[in-house]
Image (tube, helix red, strand yellow):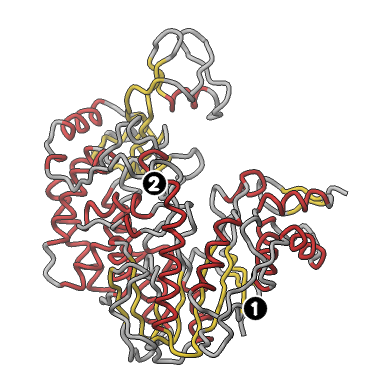
């Protein structure tokens, strides 16, 4: 039996093997598959993303045929589903890396200061250089931080002593500042960049590596072109996110991987390669304490970032992929089912016969939160093909298509849920994962499910808590961002009353009633309370259009509670 709150970690080996813009951990999907489908039955996901539903189906011995418009998503999903022996994977990976190192491993050489020995470096730290607006002095941002005890406030130009503000400052270039090596005692040691390093960098920059480098021009009309200010930062092509040295090694490694004869091993190695691309790029953010990872939901390059040894990244990821494969293979003794992933628009599923599906678990895009097709370009430059963004279920916030996009979004969702109705067997269930802070977006989902014909009262509505909160989610109380999702389960019942639902608009009463029925305490976050309100609204047929997280926060604060900006939990001020 499923509990009202489903808590799962998103740091398991499968989740960590390859990043994607959003994922539902397999641990959150498996209970639904086991509850709502027979063993050996057919499970479908028409917004498959990275293919987690197919993997969960494999682990529970169900057949799966999942789909998405995402070219990258299919690449990742099929990479997860491919089966290879761990020993063969490690051997082939080591052989490929060894051959590549023999050709261009010199790019990662440096002189260790401790003993003047030539060694491989693990990473190089690069910094933006800005111009002082007062004296036009060149300011290396990392050095400014270092002289200010790595505090970002109170920075000043060392030449004229005037205050330096990064916002609005003129960016000039990037320079390397620190090289990290394994010291004589085996521990990591940071040392300044020296002439030997500059010579290798200059040699790389004089190469023609970018002439044949995988690349996609990012169109100006893409949402993320504007949101990430790509023109301002001269990042209008995907190849511009890579350093010269890493570009040389990545190109060489990719060519050798594609020359591997065994198809399954080649597919798994390609999967591993694309998994390291964000960290192998200039998007890998530096931090004084620990790397902040790459911001995969935008094209941000931090003013201090890493140039990481690609071979180290790749071999480390091979270990992670082998670990994930082991978890998947160990879950089923004798696999008697098949799983596949095809590219298709969610509202057009001709590959599925009517009334042939036992259960659908799907995680559609959350309105205007993330633009998958735009962000996928970074990887798709390598794997070939581009996601068709004209069929993407997202709502644009800029450009000439902004007004039309909400209608298009609802049309695709309604079409997808109508396809779910068509393909599901009588009495079967659809589970929809969704999260947003705006009632207007929730209303679109609510109407789309009902318009497709599903029973108006959901079978079950659960809160999905994936534990670890995003960086943006850490400021839930101030940014008005919901950090949890709902999973709504509805039934296909052709005998049910199909009269259109008269949705009540008494949303303020719904907020008050729900909060009256739950005990506000420091064990709850604002998102928990908000989702309880949404759950009540959906069960009671209350229109969700005006049920924003902001309204719930106002009601919470009127009862003497505030939101802790670090944890997101409620604080009793009375």
What number of labels is visible?
2
Toward which corner of the image does residue 80 lie, by quadrant?
bottom left
Q: For the residue carrying disc 1, how many other residues have a C-alpha within 10 Å: few (<14), some (14-19), or many (20+)?
A: few
Q: Position of residue 88 (x, y in %)?
A: 22, 73
Q: Position of residue 272 (x, y in %)?
A: 29, 61
Q: Position of residue 177 (x, y in %)?
A: 36, 29
Q: Position of residue 134 (x, y in %)?
A: 46, 9
Residue picked out by circle 1: 3
Give the left or right position of residue 459, taking residue 82 as reference: right
Give the left or right position of residue 463, taking residue 17 as reference: right
Residue in front for this viewpoint, 170 or 192 = 170
Q: Which mark is residue 63?
A: none
Q: Residue at x 65, y 55 (%)?
A: 546
Residue picked out by circle 2: 401
Image height check: is 233 above or below 420? above
Q: Is residue 368 visible?
A: yes
- Ranked by sequence position, the earlier of labels 1 and 2 is 1
Image height check: is 286 above or below 450? above
Q: For the residue carrying disc 2, how many other residues have a C-alpha within 10 Å: few (<14), some (14-19), or many (20+)?
A: few
Q: Nearer the viewer, mark 1 or mark 2?
A: 2
Give the left or right position of residue 572, taking residue 414 as reference: right
The N terminus is located in which quarter?
A: bottom right
Determine whether the residue tagged by mark 1 lies in a helix, strand or loop. loop
Image height check: is 276 above or below 57? above
Q: Residue at x 56, y 69 (%)?
A: 8
Residue in front for this viewpoint, 140 or 437 = 437
Q: Residue at x 39, y 78 (%)?
A: 328
C-alpha gap between disc 1 and disc 2: 41 Å
Residue in front for this viewpoint, 198 or 557 = 557
Determine whether the residue tagged by mark 2 lies in a helix, strand or loop. loop
**Circles 1, 2 touching at the beta carbon (< 8 Å):** no
Toward which corner of the image does residue 285 lie, by quadrant?
top left
């Amino acid at each position: 039996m499923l509990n009202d709150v489903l808590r799962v970690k998103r740091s398991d080996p499968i989740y960590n093997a390859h990043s994607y813009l959003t994922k539902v951990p397999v641990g959150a999907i498996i209970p639904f598959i086991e509850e709502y489908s027979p063993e050996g039955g057919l499970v479908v996901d028409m917004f498959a993303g990275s293919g987690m539903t197919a993997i969960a189906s494999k682990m529970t011995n169900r057949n799966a045929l999942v789909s998405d418009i995402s070219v990258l998503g299919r690449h990742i999903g099929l990479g997860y589903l491919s089966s290879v022996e761990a020993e063969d994977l490690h051997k082939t990976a080591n052989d490929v890396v060894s051959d590549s190192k023999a050709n261009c491993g010199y790019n990662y050489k440096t002189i260790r200061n401790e003993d003047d020995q030539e060694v491989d470096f693990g990473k190089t730290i690069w910094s933006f250089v800005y111009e002082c607006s007062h004296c036009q002095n060149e300011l290396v941002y990392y050095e400014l931080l270092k002289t200010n005890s790595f505090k970002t406030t109170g920075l000043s130009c060392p030449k004229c002593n005037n205050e330096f503000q990064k916002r609005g400052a003129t960016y000039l270039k990037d320079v390397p500042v620190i090289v990290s090596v394994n010291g004589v005692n085996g521990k990591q040691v940071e040392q300044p960049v020296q002439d030997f390093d500059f010579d290798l960098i200059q040699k790389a920059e004089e190469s023609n590596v970018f002439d044949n480098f995988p690349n996609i021009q990012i169109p100006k009309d893409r949402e993320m072109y504007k949101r990430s200010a790509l023109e301002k930062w001269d990042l209008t092509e995907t190849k511009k996110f890579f350093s010269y040295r890493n570009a040389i090694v990545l190109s060489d490694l990719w060519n050798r991987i594609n020359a591997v004869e065994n198809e399954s091993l080649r597919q798994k190695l390609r999967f591993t390669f694309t998994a390291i691309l964000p960290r192998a790029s200039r998007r890998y953010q530096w931090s004084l304490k620990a790397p902040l990872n790459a911001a995969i939901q935008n094209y941000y390059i931090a003013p201090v970032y890493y140039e990481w040894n690609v071979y180290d990244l790749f071999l480390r990821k091979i270990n992670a992929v082998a670990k994930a494969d082991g978890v998947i293979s160990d879950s089923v003794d004798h696999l008697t089912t098949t799983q596949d992933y095809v590219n298709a628009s969610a509202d057009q599923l001709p590959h599925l016969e009517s009334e042939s599906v036992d259960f659908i678990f799907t995680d559609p895009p959350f309105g205007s939160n993330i633009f998958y097709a735009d962000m996928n370009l970074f990887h798709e430059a390598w794997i070939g093909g581009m996601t068709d963004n004209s069929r993407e279920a997202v709502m644009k916030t800029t450009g000439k298509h902004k007004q039309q996009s909400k209608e298009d979004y609802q049309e695709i969702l309604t079409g997808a849920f109508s396809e779910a109705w068509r393909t599901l067997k009588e009495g079967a269930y659809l589970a929809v994962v969704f999260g947003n802070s705006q009632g207007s977006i929730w209303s679109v989902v609510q109407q789309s499910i009902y318009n497709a014909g599903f029973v108006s009262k959901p079978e079950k509505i659960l809160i999905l808590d994936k534990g670890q909160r995003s960086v943006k989610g850490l400021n839930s109380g101030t940014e008005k961002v919901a950090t949890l999702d709902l999973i709504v389960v509805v039934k296909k019942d052709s005998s049910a009353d199909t009269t259109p639902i008269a949705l009540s608009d008494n949303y303020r009463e719904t907020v008050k009633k729900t909060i009256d029925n739950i005990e506000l305490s420091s064990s709850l976050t604002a998102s928990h309370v908000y989702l309880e309100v949404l759950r009540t609204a959906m069960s009671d047929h209350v229109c969700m259009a005006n049920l924003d997280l902001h309204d719930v926060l106002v009601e919470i604060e009127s009862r003497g509670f505030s939101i802790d900006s670090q944890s997101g939990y409620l604080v009793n001020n009375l």
